[in-house]
Image (cartoon, grey):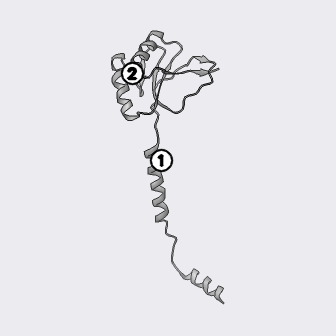
Amino acid sequence: MARRKRMLVSEGSDEDINLTPMLDVVFILLIFFIVTAQFIKEPGVDIIRQEVDNLDRQNPLGILIAIDDNSEIYIDKEQVPMQEVTFRIRELREDNPKGELVVQADKDSDAGVLIDLMEIINKVDGSNAINVSVERE
């Protein structure tokens, strides 16, 4: 008899499940992941990297600087002259102070441009070891 009363009460009630607390939790989680995510700024050009036999990997990437086959420098999908590289690196460092700075040089690019870029990075960033992205064999 008690079972019959419960079934009748549940069939007759118009109460729905309240989803508001669950949606609040989902939105809070979404905001948390957006705020804590580290976004990678792509250089914006396709680079054919040099192949090497190297087992070291860099995690996570933060700031990418690319040198294409015409020896032009790209940062954040736009071409940057050598004179503005210092300013752009400082600007990107303000947004991402802990991110690794990685240079992607095309295998057909001029080595002098890579050396000049590495000297600028050393002056601005103060790091002795500069990461150069290459293709694994």
Q: Which residue is drawn at 58% across and 80% down?
A: 10
Quadrant for the C terminus, please: top right
Looking at the rendered structure, the secondary structure element under dot 2 is strand
Badge 1 density bin: few <14, some 14–19, many ≥20, Cα 10 Å:
few
- Of the image marks 1 and 2, the number of the one nearer the N terminus: 1
- The residue shown at (35%, 27%) is 90
| The image quarter in which residue 92 lies | top left
- Would you name the residue on which mark 1 appears? 33
Q: How crowded is mark 2: few (under 14 residues within 10 Å), some or many (20 or more)?
A: some
Residue 99: where, in percent of width, then height?
Answer: 45, 32
Badge 1 element? helix
Q: How far apart are marks 1 and 2 (CA)?
A: 31 Å
Quick one: 124 or 70, which is closer to the camera?
124
In the picture, which quadrant includes the N terminus? bottom right
Residue underneath mark 2 = 79
In the image, 134: left or right of 89? right
Quick check: can you spot residue 117? yes
Please state which amino acid type lies under the numbered disc 2. Answer: Gln
**Residue 110 in view here:** no
Viewer-nearest of discs 1 and 2: 1
Q: Residue at x 49, y 65 (%)?
A: 19
Q: Residue at x 41, y 34 (%)?
A: 96
> Could you tell me residue 128's position as x and y percent?
46, 20
- Tell me whether the residue at label 1 lies in contact with that at label 2, contact meaning CB atoms closer than 8 angstroms: no
Badge 1 amino acid: Phe
The answer to whether residue 7 is above or below residue 116 is: below
Q: In this view, does 67 lie to the left or right of 11?
A: left
Q: Nearer the viewer, residue 4 or 103?
A: 103
Residue extending farthest to the bottom is 1
Q: Nearer the viewer, residue 127 or 69?
A: 127
- Residue 46 coordinates in the image, percent (x, y): 51, 23
